[in-house]
Image (spheres, grey):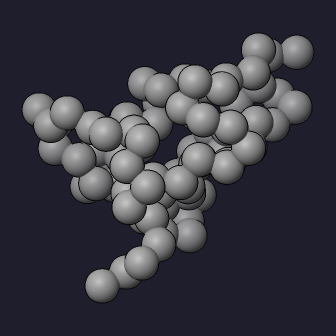
Amino acid sequence: MNQHPHMIVHPPTPSGGRRVTVDGQIVGLAHGIGDVVKFMRRAGLAEPSEDIALDDPRLIEWRGGSPDDWPSSP
């Protein structure tokens, strides 16, 4: 069993977003929780009708901030 989360939300970038990777592959730049949820569903980590636990460390790792930390665009 994989001990590491499938998804990593990286620290905020100077442009205001946060890079998101799934299993080591960049899937996009998130500008809010909605983007993270969209990336999770596209990657098959959550079903469309499923409630997503964004604080589950087995599924997602937040680096450089929590799910509540989103910088403003410059």
Q: Is 21 left or right of 35, judged from the image as shown?
A: right
Q: How many numbered circles does the render carry?
A: 0
Question: In terms of depth relative to the viewer, which is nearer, 50 or 55?
Answer: 55
**Residue at horizontal 31%, vertical 39%?**
53
**Residue at horizontal 53%, vertical 54%?**
61
Quadrant containing the C terminus is top right
Query: Which residue extends farthest bottom?
Result: 1
Quadrant containing the N terminus is bottom left
Q: Is 71 left or right of 39, judged from the image as shown?
A: right
In the rendered image, residue 32, in percent from the top left (x then y), is placed at 55, 24
In the rendered image, residue 29, in percent from the top left (x then y), is placed at 62, 39
Reply above or below: 48 against 21. Answer: above
The part of the image, by quadrant, that contains residue 38 is: top left
Q: Is 4 left or right of 2, judged from the image as shown?
A: right
Question: In terms of depth relative to the viewer, which is nearer, 39 or 71?
Answer: 71
**Residue at horizontal 27%, vertical 37%?**
52
**Residue at horizontal 43%, vertical 55%?**
57
Reply above or below: 40 against 45. Answer: above
In the rendered image, residue 12, in percent from the top left (x then y), is placed at 76, 36
Q: Is 74 left or right of 55, judged from the image as shown?
A: right
Query: Which residue extends farthest left?
Result: 49
